[in-house]
Amino acid sequence: MLADNDAIATIAVMDLQTARSFYGDALGLRERAGSDNPEVITYESGSSKILVYRSSFAGTNEATAVTWAVHELETIVEALKAKGVVFEHYDLPQLTLRGDVHVANDGFSVAWFKDPDGNILSIVTASP
């Protein structure tokens, strides 16, 4: 039923200006022009969209909200750190922490970070 339709990641935030600084400036996402709703910012990320909206429930999700599959994960981690992004470190038995990147024995790597509202975001190694 939904397989042929695009999905949009949706993230609740308390303050849209703070979110704009984080998602646009720190993460480098492209803001989509033309929204007529002052409570919503839509970003483009590759061929995907991320909708950021004002909500009193911002940051209440304790699981990962958005994941980007990337090449050169370590390079991106360093670039984000230079922009002030702080990475999360989790004690997960199947992963080894190397700097800010969690690595599995099969070569899978992931790094987690939070936006200013505490929403958990991640970047993972893309499949070849």
Image (cartoon, rainbow, N blue to C red):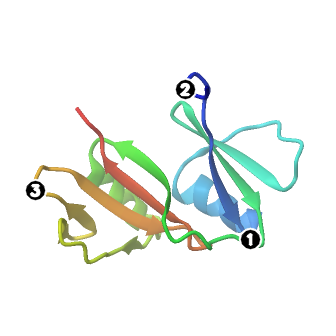
Disc 2: CA contacts within 10 A as few (<14), some (14-19) or many (>=20): few
Where residue 101 appears, as percent x and y from the top left, is 25, 64
Mark 2: which amino acid?
A: Ala
Q: Could you tell me which secondary element the residue under label 3 belongs to?
A: loop
Mark 3: which amino acid?
A: Asn
Identity of the residue drawn at 84% across and 56% down: 39
Q: Could you tell me which secondary element the residue under label 1 belongs to?
A: loop
Q: Nearer the viewer, residue 54 or 61?
A: 61
Quadrant housing residue 97: bottom left
Do callouts 3 and 2 mark residues in contact (Cβ within 8 Å)? no
Please, which residue is most extreme toward the left here?
105
Q: Foreground mark, 2 or 1?
A: 2
The residue singled out by tag 2 in the image is 3
The residue singled out by tag 1 in the image is 14
Disc 3: CA contacts within 10 A as few (<14), some (14-19) or many (>=20): few
Taking the image as shown, residue 63 lies to the left or right of residue 40, namely left
The dot on residue 105 is 3
Locate the N terminus and report the quarter of the image it occupies.
top right
Where residue 57 appears, as percent x and y from the top left, is 72, 71
| Residue 78 shows up from this direction | no
Identity of the residue drawn at 55% across and 26% down: 3
Where residue 16 appears, as percent x and y from the top left, is 75, 63
Q: Nearer the viewer, residue 71 or 89?
A: 89
